[in-house]
Amino acid sequence: MQTARYSRLAICLFAASFMGAGCLQQTPAPSQPAGAFSNMSPAEITKRLVFKEGSSFVLTRTAVRRGDTYELAEQPDQSLRTVTIKHFNGETASFDWKLEERIETDESRQARAADAEAAPEPVYETQTTEGSLSDLDFTESHALYLPLRWPEERTGDRESAVWVSKPVFEELTRTRNSTVYLNVIPALLDAARAAPGLSSAIERFRQQEGAVIGRIDTDFMKAEGDRIEWPVTVNGEQVKVEALRARNWFGEIVILNNGANPLVLKLTVNPPIEGAEDASADMSLLKAMVNFEIPSIQL
């Protein structure tokens, strides 16, 4: 009997050496730690997204500043603006921001133009701009203050930057409409001072708004459909949050469905500009300059 037990053990060890399994018990591989939000619904995650001092988020856009003009970005991460919260209490906020734009060097462009067949890899340099905004108004403001206009230092001046205010959020969730001044044209006019080549396209934009303003309220914002799930990275974890979508003549905004932090997760300017086919390239650039999205948040 003892000999039989030894024989079975020998057979088992022999099989395990070839199969990596069998009679001997294997130690299970360590499991990956679950994400902090892995078992939460989008609504639950959304409620937790409240900023404090040191929280931050990243804004992206598809245009970059080059010298005295703008151009469409060739890479999705060419323009990254990091906003770091200094103060946030639901009624007012202050923050620092840092814009990093990767711009292809003149030498790289010349080299690629001279040897189009070889297509050398572009070489980029990073230009950095920093600034701050303080005393934003979340109690009664109906006006955004778009990142395109952000100077190096400024107070909110009755604007809410890239949040909607508490009354706007309540109106959009309860009555489904509100007045929201996106301030697209003032932002473009500010940019035109530095990029005069875009002035004709901006003027066309203004003329089109002037043509319809007697018939419609271009700032009247209406919530569209039901709540939606929106992808965003929070603390390095890809999640979905609850958001609402609203639109006026100028375009569409996606707002985090959190009354304590109604952050605009995306702005898409897309007004119905008639007869703009001959200026489509400039119009695309104007939209890219103003549009933004927030792909990541760090609490």
Image: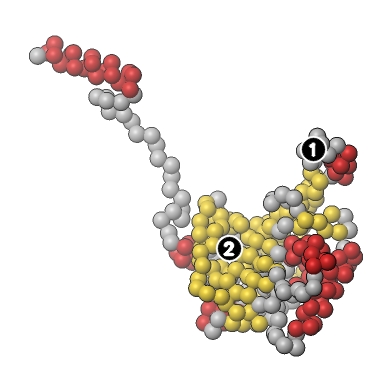
Q: In the rendered view, tell whether residue 239 sits above or below residue 159.
A: above
Q: Amino acid at mark 2?
A: Lys
Q: Please name the residue that numbered disc 2 is placed on.
A: 52
Q: Which mark is residue 212?
A: none
Asked whether the beta carbons under mark 1 and mark 2 sit within 8 Å of each other, the answer is no
Q: In the rendered view, tell whether residue 161 sits above or below residue 74.
A: below
Q: Quadrant of the C terminus?
A: bottom right
| Residue located at (54% from left, 65% from top) | 50
Q: Choose top left, top right, bottom left or bottom right for residue 151.
A: bottom right
Judged left or right of residue 166, residue 281 is: right
| Residue located at (41% from left, 56% from top) | 39
Label 1 to label 2, Cα distance in Å? 47 Å
Residue 262 picture location, percent across and down: 58, 71
Residue 25 picture location, percent across and down: 27, 28
Q: Please name the residue that numbered disc 1 is placed on.
A: 119
The secondary element bearing badge 1 is classed as: loop
| Residue located at (51% from left, 64% from top) | 229
**Neighbour tally class for label 2: few under 14, some 14-19, many 20 plus, Cα within 10 Å:** some
Residue 162 picture location, percent across and down: 66, 68
The secondary element bearing badge 2 is classed as: loop
Q: In the rendered view, tell whether residue 31 sits above or below residue 57.
A: above
Q: Residue 224 versus residue 194: which sits nearer the camera?
A: 224
Q: Residue 72 versus residue 127: which sits nearer the camera?
A: 72
**Of labels 1 and 2, the one closer to you:** 1
| Comes first in the chain, label 1 or label 2 | 2
**Neighbour tally class for label 1: few under 14, some 14-19, many 20 plus, Cα within 10 Å:** few
